[in-house]
Every structure is written in C-alpha cells, then in structure tokens.
Image (cartoon, rainbow, N blue to C red):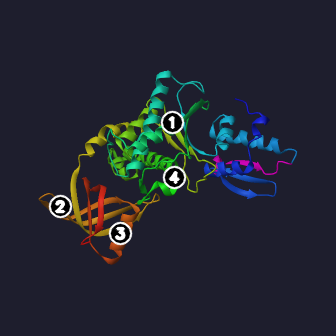
Amino acid sequence: MTLQYSDLDAVEPTKVAQYLRAAGWVERQRGLHAVVWTFGEGDEELEVLLPLDPSFRDYRARLFDMLQVLSLAEERDPQAVVADIGALTVDTQHFRLLPSLPSGSIALLHVTDAIRGVRDLMYAAAHFAFDGRPMLVQPRKRPQGVHRFVRDVRLVAPTAGSFVLTAQIPLEQAHRERFPRQHGRTEPVARQDAMSNRQVALQLHQAVRATHRAAGEALRDGSVEPFAARAGEGVSSNLCEAVGLIGRMQPFELRFSWAQSAPLTVQTPRLRFDNHLVEAIDAAAKELPGFAEAEQVELVGQVVQLNRTERGTGQVTLMGVLRAGAREEHGVRLSATLSLDQYDIAVRAHRTQQEVLAAGQLLHNRLYPVQSFTLSGD
C-alpha cells in the first residue's frame, strides 16, 4: 500500500528513534534539527536522516523519505513500518516467508503450516519460560499460564514483502503465576506483572536464536548434539518442530520489534532460516526425543575451565569421578551449561580449588540438563 502524508500524523521523532535503535540502527551524527542513523557496514551500510522539528516546512517530506528508505531496507510495506512505530504496548514478531511466488502471495496449504508453526513456537517458548526446566521433549500437559499467554497473542493481517505474518504480544496482560526463571533466579511475577509477557517474548528470541546457532553447528558437525546442548536456552524438539513447520515449504526470516513503552537495551538481531538450516532443525525435532533418554549421573570433581556466555549462562568443564548407579569412573572430563547462580558457584569453586557436585543427564561428554550444582560437602 502507498504511504500517504496523512499516515505521518501519529509518527513522532522520538518513537522513530526508539524503533530504529531497537531494530539495530546506530545514531551516527546529531544536529539541532536532524539525526543521521546507519545500519550495516561497508558497502552494505544504509543511512537515513530523521528530522526532529515538525515546525520546519520540509519536515513531512523528509520524514516521508526516511520512512520510504526504512521500508526498502526491511523489504516491507511502508504502512507496516509506520504501524510498528506506533505500536507502543506490543512486542512484535515478523515472520517474513520467502516462497517462490509473487510478493504478497503464498500457497494456501503452505501458509496453514506456517501459522500452525507460529502458534506452536509460542507454546514452546512460553512453556520453557513458565516451567524453567530444560526439556528436550516438553510434556503435552502445560502450565495454565502458558495457555493464557498464547491466547493473548494476536496475529495481524499479512502484508507484502514476500509474505509477512505478524504476531503481537501485548505487554499489559498480567499473569499471576510464578516465573521460576529470571536469569537463573526465582522471582514472583507479582513484582513485574506488566513484564511477564515481555519475559516470554525475550525467551522466544533466545530459544529461536539458540536453535539457529545449533543448526549451523549441526550442519558442520553432522550431529544433533548442538541442539541438545542448548536445552538450557529453551531448545526442545517441540520448538524445533515449530520452526520446521514455518520453514517447511520456504525459507523465512524472523525479526523482533519491541514495544516503545518499554524499550529494550539489548540487541535482538533478525534471524534467517534457509532450506539447509530448516532441514537440520527438522532432523533435530525427530532425533531429540531419543536424547531425552540419556543416563542420569553425578560428577564430583574440579572446575577446570570457565566461559561466561552473553545470555546469563556459563559454560564450564569439569573433571572428576563420575557415578551412575553402581558404576564409578575416575578421571572423567565433562562440559556443562550452567545458570547464572550455578556459574557463580563454579567461579568460586575454581578460585578456591574446591570440589563441586553436579547432577544431570549424560550426553556423550556433556552434562545436560544440569539438575543441581553445589559445592561438594554443602
């Protein structure tokens, strides 16, 4: 649809700036009446000029031009961009499907798969956020808060730009259940009622991003182990199956934009799933249930290596005595992904050379999920 000057009435420079920042643009130069923003690097760098003063005669023309460039950069309809800028109280996920058909069209049977995949993706991310336990296979019975959350999600009318499905998660909805996970800590939702849906949206991005990375590693290694190793980030066979449904018949991109009433400070880059990545994710969806039957073990030993990750978790390497029922092995070396609190214990143990006791399931040379992690003797 063609953008009209009348569409600009509700577009405020401060909201545009928040939108650009959330979408990964960087403020490069600020003047008294305009700001230069850029996106990308080198030959692929894009630049827009955001006017600041509506009293200037050419303010609307400059704002119109900026929105046209922004819509071209995102390969979306300008009015869809304007709608996102005005979305003050919803977090939005844009699923840009890339079928080999004219822009704005898709085969009927293919879009039904994609819509079902979007729904199942919301269920998988919300289940992990509400339950808090890494699960390679989520049970059919879900916490009641998961169903309430998914009922809150809205699907907006599709737009052109290949074929874009847009899901919106309102911030206002308050869930009165506890969230077991808040960056490794237990906190009641009552302290952050208005942020509970945001928390699930962030978990959704973390889980899909972890799935994207795992797929890249799986293509290189020829194994689904990278998916199993990221159970602590929300990866599961359920989530993989949902991603596979969305990309079953076409590649797709997923982009997040965040409610302007609660701007986000961390970067959430867009994710592109080509046919090869989707095939790897489909394979993981089928094979991960077998990994869920891994052996239950305990390891008592030293923390020999530490590596903090960007998402509030940490990777550690442990060496010591492995116990599995009556079996006991010495000199076993395992890696594990820990929550923030568990990683703090690992740092303290490494510094003081204390032994730790870690319990979980054994997958090859990796402990996942880590069900408990304490100083030995505590």
Q: What residue is disc 4 on?
A: 193
- First-in-chain label (4 vs 1): 4
Q: Which label lies toward us, 3 or 4?
A: 4
Name the residue located 52 percent from the left edge and 28 percent from the top edge: 99
Question: Furthest-bottom residue in view?
Answer: 352
Magenta stretch: residue 48 in it? Answer: yes
Where residue 243 sits in the image (x, y, percent)? 43, 38
Number of numbered discs visible in the structure rendering: 4
Split into 4 quadrants, where in the image is the C terminus?
Answer: bottom left
Circle 4 SS class: helix
The nearer-to-camera label among 4 and 1 is 4
Residue on which disc 1 sits:
252
Q: How many angstroms separate mark 4 from mark 1 (CA)?
A: 33 Å
Classify 10 Å Cα crowding around label 1: few (below 14), some (14-19), many (20 and above). Answer: many
**Residue furthest top in the image:** 108
The x and y percentages for residue 372 are 29, 61
Region rendered in magenta: 41-55
Residue depth check, mark 1 versus mark 3: number of the one nearer the observer:
3
Which is more N-terminal, label 2 or label 1? 1
Mark 3 sits on what residue? 345
- Counting from the top left corner in percent of width and height, residue 157 is at 59, 30
Q: Looking at the image, is 146 positioned above or below residue 181?
A: above
Badge 2 amino acid: Arg
